[in-house]
Image (cartoon, rainbow, N blue to C red):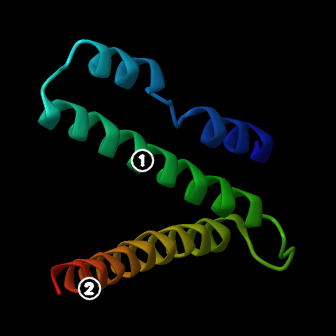
Amino acid sequence: MKESWVFGSLISATDPVAVLAIFKEMDADEDLYAVVFGESIFNDAIGIVMFQTVMQMGKNPDLNQNAELGLAFGRFVTIFFGSLVLGAILALVAAFILKR
């Protein structure tokens, strides 16, 4: 079952490189390009976090399945929101530096 989850987390993050290349060739709307690009980055990040979370599952034989799922969910939420906060802080610092 773990192998299925790992495989699913790897292939679930689709990469729209072809779509972005076509948008660039066709001079598509910049907002549309930004939305698709942002969504692809978000999918990649979720795929990485999910892969790391699933790989950590099953390492402690003392835990039952419900406790393992609870820890996996907690790990996922911690990494997700930690990355979000870190990205926001770095973006604000970069914006402050570039503004000056």
Residue at screen point 64% across, 63% down: 53
Which callout, 2 or 1, points to the residue nearer the camera? 2
- Rendered view: 44 above or below 64: above
Instruction: Give how far across and how far down residue 58 sits, in percent.
Output: 80, 65
Residue denoted by label 2? 97
Residue at screen point 73% across, 37% down: 4
Q: Amino acid at mark 2?
A: Ile
- Rendered view: 27 above or below 57: above
Residue at screen point 46% across, 26% down: 17
Cα separation, mark 2 vs mark 1, equals 24 Å
Q: Is residue 33 rendered to the left or right of residue 44?
A: left
Disc 2 crowd rating (10 Å Cα; few below 14, some 14-19, many 20+) is few
Residue denoted by label 1? 41
Cβ atoms under marks 2 and 1 closer than 8 Å: no
Between 74 and 32, the one nearer to me in the picture = 32
Mark 2 vs 1, N-terminal side: 1
